[in-house]
Image (cartoon, rainbow, N blue to C red):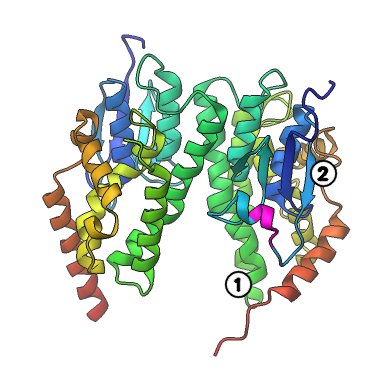
């Protein structure tokens, strides 16, 4: 589908490794909307970012015309509403919509902190407990997938939807974590449907070019950990 | 709205999150059954309807549960479209409203709790957040403009915390945030808000009791 908006109308402030930034990128791809990708440097915040998101000073920020929109899932919903003629991202039924929003909130508020908790866990026992917690969350999401997908390929049905985007953006980081800890988080035994879904998601046309390669992400993770390593306790 | 719509709210009288749902239902003129739950002894219905978080509020609409207060408010707005739209039609304004409601959730709730338990630095940060919300309100009567909107519904239940915050943080809301206090009283003039919030003295008393018990446990 030809882009209906020139790329100068739409800018996205972000960074290639960020799962949150991936979300609006996937949404814009689904809608075939061209955009200018303004990448932030790690460790510094551009004037444009600080001016566009003075409250949180975080990426991603979508700038449409001269209007900034902040918070990744708010941006995805905005994109869905503005480019309404493209494939729908949110379910049309209010109940299905509420369900998708519920699981997206669960992923961000409960599950993602457990994933980032793995890197912070001190000692083998704490690490194993942290990894177990992430898997427990994925088992819940496996169950949600079965209910939401109703036998189709994605949470959203035949095509990628809101909840696919909300969870799928973390797949790169899930793989990095699996490699670093030598343990499968998404596995055939406990989360077979999510394993199949993950492959389909990553090979989808709207995701392929914005999903970072696992090796590149792993290198970035090392740089991140070195740069932001917490000072030793007093 | 179907005549046979069954709407039940799993509720807690002191919960600002449950109040959000009650305000939204009242704005839309929807009759509902309120069922108080006891969080120290959660009902089988709550555990069945919200197995993931096991928390109120839960809206049960024709047997189907909807959880998380702001998600419930959006659901109510999307199902009952006949009156009182809570979210703006314009996508940009809608995004703006969602952003600020999310801000209330991220900041006001946790900072409020920290002020209640006398944590260092919380009061200063909380007042800064309130002032930012005042800037956002500007000279509009409501965050939603001329009528109550999504952000008003998200924030106004925290009016029930104002006296507690003043007492525990030793400051005056009307001195620090006069615009916000005026806005809160304006909201209370609406029946949908005044009938959905508990008596302010009663809830202040409740917080003080809780605080006494909390202090007693700490010093035990």
User: Which label number is shown at residue A126?
Assistant: 1
- Where does the image place residue A215, in percent across and percent down from the top left? 88, 59
Please, is residue A56 above or below residue A102 in the view? below
Q: Quadrant of residue A206?
A: top right
Q: Closer to the camera, B60 or A59? A: A59
Q: Which residues are magenta?
A: A45-49
In the picture, residue B86 is in which quadrant?
top left
Extreme-front residue of the structure:
B139
Tell me: residue B4, above or below residue A225: above
> Which chain letter goes with mark 1?
A
Disc 2, SS:
loop
| Secondary element at image label 1 | helix
Location of residue A197 by image quarter: top right
Quadrant occupied by the C terminus of chain A = bottom right
User: Residue reaching furthest top?
Assistant: B3
- Tell me, yes or no, if residue B220 can be seen here: no
């Amino acid at each position: 589908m030809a882009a209906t908006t020139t790329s100068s109308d739409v800018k996205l402030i972000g960074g290639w490794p960020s799962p949150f930034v991936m979300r609006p990128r996937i949404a814009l791809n689904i809608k075939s909307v061209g955009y200018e990708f303004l990448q932030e440097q790690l460790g510094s915040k551009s004037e444009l970012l600080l001016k566009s998101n003075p409250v949180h000073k975080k990426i991603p920020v979508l700038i449409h015309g001269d209007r900034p929109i902040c918070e990744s899932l708010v941006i995805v919903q905005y994109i869905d509403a503005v480019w309404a003629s493209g494939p729908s991202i949110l379910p049309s039924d209010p109940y299905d919509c509420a369900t998708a929003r519920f699981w997206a909130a669960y992923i961000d508020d409960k599950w993602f902190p457990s994933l980032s908790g793995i890197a912070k866990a001190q000692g083998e026992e704490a690490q194993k407990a942290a990894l177990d917690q992430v898997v427990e969350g994925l088992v819940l999401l496996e169950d949600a997938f079965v209910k939401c997908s109703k036998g189709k390929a994605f949470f959203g049905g035949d095509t990628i939807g809101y909840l696919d985007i909300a969870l799928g953006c973390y797949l790169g980081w899930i793989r990095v974590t699996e490699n670093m800890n030598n343990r499968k988080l998404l596995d055939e035994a406990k989360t077979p449907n999510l394993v199949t879904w993950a492959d389909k998601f990553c090979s989808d046309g709207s995701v392929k070019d914005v999903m970072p390669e696992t090796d590149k992400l792993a290198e970035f993770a090392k740089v991140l950990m070195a740069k932001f390593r917490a000072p030793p306790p007093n | 709205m179907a005549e046979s719509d069954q709407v039940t709210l799993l509720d807690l009288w002191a919960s600002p999150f449950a109040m959000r749902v009650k305000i939204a239902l009242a704005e839309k003129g929807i009759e509902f059954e309120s069922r108080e739950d006891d969080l120290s002894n959660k009902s089988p219905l709550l555990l069945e309807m919200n197995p993931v978080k096991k928390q109120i509020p839960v809206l049960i609409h024709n047997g189907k549960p909807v959880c998380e207060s702001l998600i419930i408010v959006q659901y109510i707005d999307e199902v009952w479209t006949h009156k009182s739209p809570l979210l703006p039609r314009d996508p940009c304004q809608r995004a703006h409203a969602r952003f600020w409601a999310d801000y209330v959730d991220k900041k006001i709730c946790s900072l409020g709790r920290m002020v209640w338990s006398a944590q260092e630095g919380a009061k200063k940060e909380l007042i800064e957040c309130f002032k930012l919300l005042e800037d956002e309100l500007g000279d509009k009567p409501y965050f939603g403009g001329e009528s109550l909107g999504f952000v008003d519904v998200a924030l106004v239940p925290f009016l029930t915390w104002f006296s507690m915050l003043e007492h525990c943080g030793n400051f005056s809301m009307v001195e620090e945030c006069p615009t916000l206090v005026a806005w809160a009283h304006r909201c209370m003039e609406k029946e949908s808000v005044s009938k959905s919030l508990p008596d302010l003295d009663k809830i202040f008393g409740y917080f003080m009791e809780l605080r006494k018990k909390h202090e007693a446990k700490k010093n035990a």
